[in-house]
Image: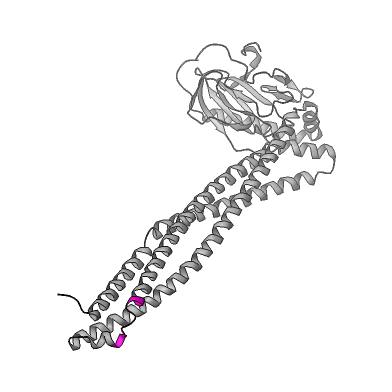
């Protein structure tokens, strides 16, 4: 049976209402929760990164203040040497954090781009639906709302049509408002996306600036060399204090050796290889120095350009100590101890970086760190010790010819 015009108009309106309701629901729920959680997590990470960057900036400012407070050029030079590795370590961490921040921002940009794409698609589909509603209204524009109502077969039909027409009209208004809101939101998202892209570009520029700083710092470190005469001057300037510091250093190190769980296997055998390739100068030998006031428990290997050079295991063994913490101007700085079996060990001190962990088995010649100037040091060098049962011996008696 053919539908009369009023029933056809009613059916078109009802279908239009269903489409609006279904599309509105789906459009508002796709990926909103997942993207929201991801953005929230990225923002928390960004806050943590910014907090750590602020801490590093404060540390750097404190170092600069310490250097700036030096009263003489000699004291200023000593401060620079003391904080050399710490400055470089701060710059390296800043670069790592900035790279992490760039990656987080890149993920946010990708999510925002996907959101804009989905929102644009939703807007286009809503606009097409709006066009269809306008077209339907135009095609059936000869019939009035009153005509649709008067064409009802019963009171129930009349009330049902009246309710449907009211809902359709309301959803038409809602659809128009939604199109307006979508356009406003799209413009806002485009603005935010552009802001984040600018922020990413700024982070790239800052990272490159930090890389330049790191390069300059490393170059400055590379031309320095341990000044043993300066160290002697420092030692003798306040003999009681420096001797007490040396005694404390030795006691702390002896305590470290006492706490080591030594391997029960015999010595791995063979000669000890030279720990820094291409650098053979010994700036301070094993034994008494500083006019017999200080006993040096190892040898110091130094030379122009030694900073950052790989430090290699003198023999195979297990890493039993990898000390990262240090106080500028005090102690051995960052150091590594390797157990070669038979209670024989080697120590590598004043490192700028450590590339192994406690428990690692290393082969002879394997890199375990990089030459630095951490701890009590007046310039980049490697302090190398050879010990038997925890007692130091002259390393040159066991080291392979250079």
Quarter of image, res 86: top right
Residue 401 image point, x, y percent? 65, 10
Residue sitting at x 58%, y 28%: 336
Segment tinted magenta in the rendering: 137-146
Q: Is residue 274 visible?
A: yes
On the rendered structure, is 350 left or right of 191?
Answer: right
Residue at the extreme left of the image, as rendered: 1
In percent of the image, x 67 and y 36: which residue is there?
Answer: 85
Quarter of the picture holding the N terminus: bottom left
Instruction: Mark yes or no: residue 329 visible.
Output: no
Which quadrant holds residue 315? top right
Asked if the stretch drawn in magenta spans residue 144, the answer is yes
Give how far across and how far down residue 329 sits, in percent: 71, 37
Assess whether residue 2 is covered by the magenta stretch.
no
Side of 332 relative to 113 (left or right): right
The x and y percentages for residue 115 are: 45, 58
Quadrant of the image containing the C terminus: top right
> Residue 369: x and y, percent?
59, 28
x 63%, y 22%: residue: 385
């Amino acid at each position: 049976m053919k539908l009369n015009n009023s029933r056809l108009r009613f059916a078109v309106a009802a279908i239009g209402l269903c489409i609006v309701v279904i599309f509105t629901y789906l459009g508002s729920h796709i990926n909103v929760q997942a993207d929201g959680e991801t953005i929230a997590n990225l923002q928390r990470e960004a806050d943590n990164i910014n907090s750590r960057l602020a801490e590093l900036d404060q540390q750097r400012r404190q170092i600069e203040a310490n250097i700036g407070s030096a009263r003489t050029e000699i004291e200023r030079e000593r401060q620079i040497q003391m904080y050399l590795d710490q400055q470089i370590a701060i710059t390296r961490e800043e670069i790592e954090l900035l790279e992490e921040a760039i990656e987080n921002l890149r993920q946010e940009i990708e999510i925002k781009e996907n959101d804009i794409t989905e929102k644009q698609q939703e807007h286009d589909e809503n606009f097409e639906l709006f066009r269809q509603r306008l077209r339907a209204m135009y095609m059936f524009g000869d019939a009035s709302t009153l005509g649709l109502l008067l064409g009802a077969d019963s009171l129930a039909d009349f009330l049902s049509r009246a309710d449907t027409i009211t809902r359709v009209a309301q959803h038409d208004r809602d659809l128009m408002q939604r199109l307006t809101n979508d356009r406003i939101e799209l413009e806002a998202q485009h603005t935010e996306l552009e802001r984040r892209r600018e922020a990413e570009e700024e982070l790239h520029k800052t990272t490159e600036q930090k890389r330049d700083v790191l390069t300059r710092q490393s170059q400055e470190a590379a031309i320095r060399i341990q000044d043993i005469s300066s160290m002697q001057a420092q030692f003798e300037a306040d003999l009681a204090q420096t001797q007490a510091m040396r005694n404390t250093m030795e006691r702390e190190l002896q305590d470290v050796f006492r706490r080591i769980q030594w391997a029960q296997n015999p010595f791995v055998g063979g000669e000890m290889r030279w720990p820094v390739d291409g650098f053979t100068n010994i700036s301070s030998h094993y034994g008494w120095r500083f006019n017999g006031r200080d006993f040096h428990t190892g040898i110091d290997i130094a030379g122009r350009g030694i900073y950052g050079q790989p430090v290699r295991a003198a023999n195979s063994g297990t890493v039993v100590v990898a000390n990262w913490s240090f106080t500028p101007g005090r102690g051995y700085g960052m150091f590594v101890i390797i157990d070669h079996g038979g209670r024989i060990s080697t120590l590598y001190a004043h490192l700028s970086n450590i590339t192994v962990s406690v428990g690692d088995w290393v082969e002879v010649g394997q890199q375990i760190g990089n030459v630095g100037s951490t701890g009590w040091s007046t310039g980049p060098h490697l302090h190398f010790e050879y010990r038997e049962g925890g007692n130091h011996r002259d390393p040159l008696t066991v080291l392979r010819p250079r």
